[in-house]
Amino acid sequence: MKPEDIFGKVVAPSPLGKLIPANDTQSGEKAIGTLLGNFVQLIFVVGTVGFVFMILLSAIQMIFSGGDKEGLAKARGRLTWAIIGIVLLSLSFVIFRVLEGVTGFKFVF
């Protein structure tokens, strides 16, 4: 008695096909990469606009504090958090670049 008679014949599964409709020219991997890339770019743009807004708001608050120590401290705190935010945004950019190398997806510009 042969092993094929007991277990049956083992064959490779058929390919799954595309993960997106046939009328689209991108493969499923490229579509997911494009979707993730667009999402990450949107987050970077929103973060950068937020950073610029926080810097301008801090500057205006410093100018209009008129020497008030409490107002100046609030503006300095906002400026500190804005700088921490842009550092984290830059660090996430580096992390996404590393992920691009590992996964092959294109996340950022």
Image (cartoon, rainbow, N blue to C red):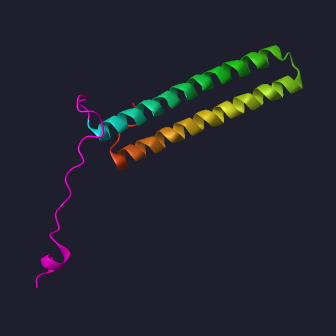
Q: Looking at the image, how many numbered discs can be counted on the residues? A: 0
Is 96 in front, or is 90?
96
Res. 108 visible in picture: no
Verify whether residue 64 appears in magenta.
no
Question: Residue drawn 32% across and 44% down?
Answer: 104
* The stretch drawn in magenta includes residue 18: yes
Q: For residue 6, which quarter of the picture?
A: bottom left
Q: Is residue 10 left or right of residue 99?
A: left
Residue 45, percent across and down?
51, 25
Which part of the image, by quadrant, shows the C terminus? top left
What x and y, as percent, mark residue 88? 58, 39
The part of the chain drawn in magenta is 1-26
Q: Main secondary structure of the magenta part?
A: loop
Relative to 83, residue 1 above or below: below
Question: Residue at the spot x=36%, y=50% of the render?
Answer: 102
Q: Is residue 65 visible?
A: yes
Q: Position of residue 68 (x, y in %)?
A: 88, 21
> For the point 53% across and 41% down, which residue is it?
91
Quadrant assignment, res 24: top left
- Asked if 14 appears above or below 4 in the picture, the reply is above
